[in-house]
Image (cartoon, rainbow, N blue to C red):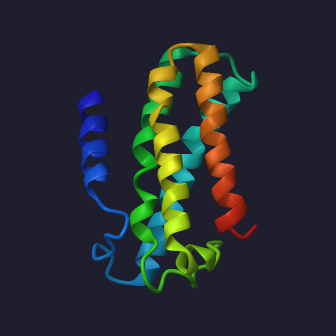
Amino acid sequence: MKSLFAAVAVAAALLPLSSHAQFAKPEDAIKYRQSAYTVLGAHFGRLGAMVNGRIPYDAKVASYNASLVSTLAHLPGTAFGPGTDTGLNTRAKAEIWKDPAKFQAAYEKMVDATGKLPAAAGDPAALKTAFGAAAATCKGCHDDFRRE
């Protein structure tokens, strides 16, 4: 299982954020990024439930979800290409395409912060700190680049 995570992480890391050719239509990219964010959010939410005491801390479950979040964070960035700013009820704000450097920097902060979760997953206090930092990067993107 760990080798699968490692392989996916390496593949995702090799895909530049501007790699849009993998999608036949803009709608395909929008569906992909929405799906990636949904799965990412589900696993991030499981960590949040532990960190906030809604469910008991379990090191094995925390480690599993932290590894997934770290890997999944790489996926949606490839799906913000030309023509993906409208359609399919996207909540992406136009600012993503108006200021791509700002979006790229925010996205990279999220990838970096979520990348620290696996190392912190074995210790509840460390996980809480790493989770808080990652959650702040998520909130920053939501505030600046996502319509509610």
Q: Is residue 1 visible?
A: no
Q: Is residue 29 visible?
A: yes
Residue 135 placement (x, y as % from top left): 65, 41
Residue at position x 31%, y 70% in the image: 19
User: Image quarter for residue 92?
Assistant: bottom right
- In the rendered view, would you say 107 is above or below 147? above
Residue 108 placement (x, y as % from top left): 47, 52
- In the rendered view, would you say 96 is above or below 113? below
The number of numbered badges drawn on the structure is 0
Residue at position x 58%, y 84% in the image: 86
Residue at position x 64%, y 67% in the image: 145
Quadrant for the C terminus in the image = bottom right
Residue at position x 33%, y 74% in the image: 20
Quadrant for the N terminus in the image = top left
Looking at the image, residue 87 sits to the left or right of residue 140; the answer is left
Residue 125 placement (x, y as % from top left): 64, 15
Q: Nearer the viewer, residue 100 or 60?
A: 100
Looking at the image, residue 138 sits to the left or right of residue 75; the answer is right
Residue 64 placement (x, y as % from top left): 45, 27
Looking at the image, residue 46 sits to the left or right of residue 112; the answer is right
- In the rendered view, would you say 65 is above or below 53? below
- In the rendered view, would you say 51 is above or below 27? above
Q: Nearer the viewer, residue 42 or 135?
A: 135
User: Image quarter for residue 75?
Assistant: bottom left
